[in-house]
């Protein structure tokens, strides 16, 4: 089940705050940038870079994902390993609020999200 329109607006506001604090400086955003997408009940943060084979093409590199479980009123936290699959972030597998997820990603204590 998708999150409500009210929750979508709240997510967008929080994500915009996160990006404004973590995006690279404007002069290098053509080389590397951060973005997010909302898809049903999930929020995904990804990096945007030129493709190494064709610099006119852009590629997206997933960084972190949180999926809201409405029945439990919590967000499941994921990171993408080198096998290109999403895995639960074991140091903090769930959080109550999206802001907590963004804090975990921003701190990146175990270098799982930003390397």
Image (cartoon, rainbow, N blue to C red):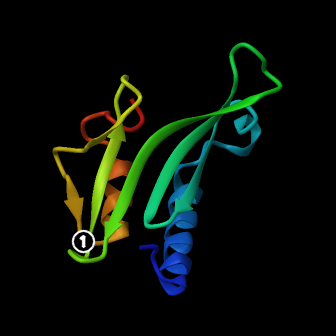
Q: Position of residue 6 (x, y in %)?
A: 51, 86
Q: Nearer the viewer, residue 62 or 27?
A: 62
User: Label 1 crowding class (10 Å Cα cut-off): few <14, some 14-19, many 20+?
Assistant: some
Q: Quadrant of the C terminus?
A: top left
Q: Residue at x 27, y 58 (%)?
A: 76
75 horizontally vs 90: left or right: right
Residue at the far right: name it: 56
Q: Position of residue 95 (x, y in %)?
A: 24, 64
Secondary structure beneath label 1? loop
Residue 74 against residue 84 in the figure, above or below = below
Q: Residue at x 53, y 61 (%)?
A: 39
73 horizontally vs 14: left or right: left
Residue corresponding to mark 1: 96
Please tell me in which quadrant of the rendered image residue 53 appears: top right
Residue at the far top: name it: 53
Q: Position of residue 82 (x, y in %)?
A: 37, 23
13 horizontally vs 76: left or right: right
Q: Residue at x 32, y 47 (%)?
A: 78
Residue 28 against residue 21 in the figure, above or below = above
Q: Residue at x 36, y 49 (%)?
A: 105
Q: Position of residue 65 (x, y in %)?
A: 40, 51
């Amino acid at each position: 089940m998708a999150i409500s329109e009210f929750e979508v607006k709240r997510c967008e506001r929080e994500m915009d705050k996160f990006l404004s604090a973590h995006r690279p400086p404007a002069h290098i955003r053509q080389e590397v940038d951060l973005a997010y997408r909302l898809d049903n009940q999930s929020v995904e943060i990804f990096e945007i870079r030129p493709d190494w084979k064709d610099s006119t093409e852009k590629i997206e590199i997933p960084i972190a994902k949180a999926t809201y479980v409405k029945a439990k009123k919590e967000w499941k936290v994921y990171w993408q390993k080198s096998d290109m699959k999403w895995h639960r972030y074991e140091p903090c597998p769930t959080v109550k609020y999206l802001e907590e997820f963004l804090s975990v990603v921003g701190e990146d204590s175990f270098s799982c999200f930003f390397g």
